[in-house]
Every structure is written in structure tokens, then in C-alpha cells.
Image (cartoon, helix red, strand yellow):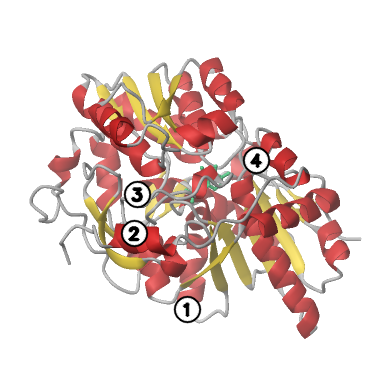
Amino acid sequence: MSDYRYLLSEREIPKFWYNVVPDLPAPLPPPLHPGTLQPARPQDLEAIFPHALIEQEVTAAQNIPIPEPVLDILRLWRPTPLHRAVRLEKALGTPAKIFFKNEGVSPAGSHKPNTAIAQAYYNKTAGVKRLTTETGAGQWGSALSLACNVFGMECMVYMVKCSFYQKPHRRTMMECWGAKCVPSPSDLTQAGRKILAEDPETPGSLGIAISEAVEDAATHKETNYSLGSVLNHVLLHQTVIGKEAMAQMELAGASPDIVIGCCGGGSNFAGLAFPFVPEKAAGKNIRLIAVEPAACPTMTKGIYAYDFGDKSGMTPLLKMDTLGHDFIPPGIHAGGLRYHGMSPLVSLLHRAGVVEAVSYPQLKCFEAALTFARAEGLIVEPETSHAVCCVVEEALKAKEEGREKTILFNLSGHGHFDMAAYEKYFAGELSDYEYPEAKIREALAHLPKAS
Ligand SMILES: Cc1ncc(COP(=O)(O)O)c(C=O)c1O
């Protein structure tokens, strides 16, 4: 009989974050100042980020200690369980062993609090009183609301309009933790008002919501901006997932051949996969697969270039896989995967061949999520369903080839706020979007001129 879960005690929570930068196959191109297009200096970022996070953004140190007050909050739900999906293996009839890390057990329901708690802590210790942010699916906004509440700070969340109406209870959740949440674009910022004037019916996008949150932070006293993915320090904070998973896989007497995570800005994927990069660099045959939606195929169809992180061109330029900051993805239910860019760290590793990327349309992902729910009982977020889809595909490939692969994936969030999406799926009202080639071509034509 196989065990279903592998658990660590509170004392075994990692005490250090893992920084992948020293293990990169090439130097990471620096962010550029949006005005001068010259490498941004740390002080350029000080208007919206605290010093400690800027330092983590640029550090080349391998192991970064996790402050005790952060560990103290993470202990409320960490270490998260590692599950062996024995019943899914049986349902698929695969010889593959399937493991997953369950980040859905956090108070906000996803991996996002791992960095929200750290970011709120560093801002609080820098004397900041209020944080602004964007949110797609609502998971990040919920996580930051929770974190601000824990550290006694105000929180203002700009939620992508289509997700705001798809998931009204996410906003209520944020309000439970004392935050304010408005649909984006809003009339509260210049960036929002401009976009509403051009297209009052826009579904919104993460790029637009970032513009609003950055503008809010830059124009209000004692207010900083906080980003839920993409940046180096965010991915760093998520590596507790992979570090725990490594210890738990050892308990299970297993080692992954394939590591899978869905990718919006890259943080949950990196959190699980980056701690395995040194093993891969040392010659271990291990595949790291990042999964994205076919409707927003940043890595599989985008280009590797400098681009803005937001729609209005207010953020520094990052060298990343991008579809163009003007691109507004179709309103798929995986709102957290509707981002035009990708973390520079994940992008560099993707372009270097260390990370593979695949994309799937949403109907196939919902189908895989239901196979998973009916075997394992857990209902995943539409974002996570992309990882599950890839797991099912790899497990069936192992069956066809008669090979006993070990697959590890990140269950990045539960889907309890996503019943409207599942309802639409059952009613046959969900459709796949065509690959928006013309819109992407147009957006790529507007890339800033930096090489
Ligand atoms: C549950 C879940 N998984 C994945 C993502 C994608 O973001 P990232 O690539 O930063 O993990 C999100 C974003 O909102 C999310 O809520």
C-alpha cells in the first residue's frame, strides 16, 4: 500500500530561500529605466519598493535567510503536504508515479501568501503604511490582504474587471481582511481613466491593473506597490515550496523525472522547480515544464525582448518572453495566467533550454481538472488545471511507452471560488479561444526600442 501524504513538522519549514541567480547559465540582463532605457539603478525603484526587497531583487547570494517574523506567520499553514496521487494514477492506468504539493491549504487558498507575507513584513519594517497591488484571479489580492492585515497595514487592490465580475466573493474575502478592492480599469487613476475613455467595455488585463496600482503607490504618501509574481524577489520567496518538496520526496523514497507548474508570471512554477535547477545543471535527467494557456501563449509564441511590465509603460523594462505590453488576452477563466510577459528568470531559463514550455486550451484543462477532482477529491483553480492537464498528458505518455516516470506538480490553488467557471463548463457555455495571432502581432509591433 502506498502512502497518500508526506508531511513535515513545523520545525522543518525551510529557514532559507533558494536564489537561482548563481546557477543561471548566463547573466540576467538588468531591468532598464523606462525613461532613459539605461540599466535601472536600485534607487530608481525606491519610490515604490522597500530597500530590503530591492536588495533581494539584485542579490547574487545563493541562500537568503527567512526572517523569524515571516517564518512565524508561514507556520500557520506550512509546511504544506506533499500528496501521492495514487487514485489518479489508477484512474489513468499509468505506471507513472504522480506527486503534488498542495499550496491550496493556505488561508487565501494558493501559493501567493508565501511572498505576500514576506513583502508586507519588509514594507512594514521600512515604515510603509499602505500597499497597492493588482490581482487577476483574485488569489494575489486575497494573499496581500491577508498579509497586510497580519502586519496592521492598509491594502488597496485593483482587480482585473472580467475576474472581478466572474468571482465576486474574492472581493468579499479581501474585505474580510480589511482591504479595499475595485474593478480595473477604474476611474481612480489617470491610467484607468485613459483606458476607459478609449474602450469602456474592456475586460481589463493584468498589465492595466499594474499601471493603476503603480500610479496609486507613486502618488500617495507612505504607500508602496507590491507585485505578486514576475520579479526575482517574488520567485525567491516561493522557493519554500520546492525546498519542502525535495525533503518530502526523499521521505517518499522518490525523485522526480518531470516537474510541472502552471505559469502566469512564473512564481508558483519557479517556487517548485528552481530548487531542482542545480540537480539538472549537474547532469540529472529532469524535465522542468512550464504550462501556459493557448489564449495567452507568452513563452510558446512570444518573443524574448525588453518590454514594459504594465500597459502604460510606467514600470522598468524587463528582458522577458512577451506578447507585447499592449496585448489584452481573451477573458479566459484562468485570470491569473492572463499576463503578457513572463518572469525574466523563467524566461532566461526557457531560452537556455533548461525550462520547457507548453500551452493548452481551456476546455482540455477543465476536462483534466475534473478527472483529477473525481480521482483525488480536490477541485483546483482554472490556473492550476493547466498544470493538471500537462500531468495527465505526461502520465498517459508514460503509459503508452510503458515507462515508470515520476511526476511532481504544484497544485497552486484550490478552485472553491471558481464554481461559476465549472458551472459554465457543465452547461457547455465555455469555449476555446482561437490563438489571437493578429492581436499579438500588433502588440509586438509596439515593443519599446531597447535591445
Ligand atoms: C492558483 C494560481 N496559480 C497560478 C497563478 C499564476 O501565477 P504565477 O505564475 O505567478 O504562479 C495564479 C495567479 O493568480 C494563481 O492564482
On screen, residue 451 versus residue 257, left or right, reads left
Secondary structure under tag 2 reads helix
Query: What residue sits right under mark 3 in the picture?
Result: 231
Amino acid type, label 2: Pro
Q: Residue drawn at (52%, 51%), measured in percent from left and top?
A: 268
Which sits earlier in the primary sequence, circle 1 or circle 2? 1
How far apart marks 1 and 2 lie (CA) works out to 22 Å
Amino acid type, label 4: Gly
How far apart marks 2 and 4 lie (CA) works out to 26 Å
Query: What residue sits right under mark 1 in the picture?
Result: 282
Q: For the residues carrying marks 1 and 4, which lies nearer the camera in this image?
A: 4
Q: Residue drawn at (65%, 69%), measured in percent from left and top?
A: 256
Amino acid type, label 3: Leu
Which sits earlier in the primary sequence, circle 1 or circle 4? 4
Image quarter hosting the N terminus:
bottom right
The image shows residue 400 at horizontal and vertical percentages of 79, 81
The image shows residue 430 at horizontal and vertical percentages of 67, 48
Q: Is mark 4 within 8 Å of ligand 1?
A: yes
On screen, residue 348 versus residue 69, left or right, reads left
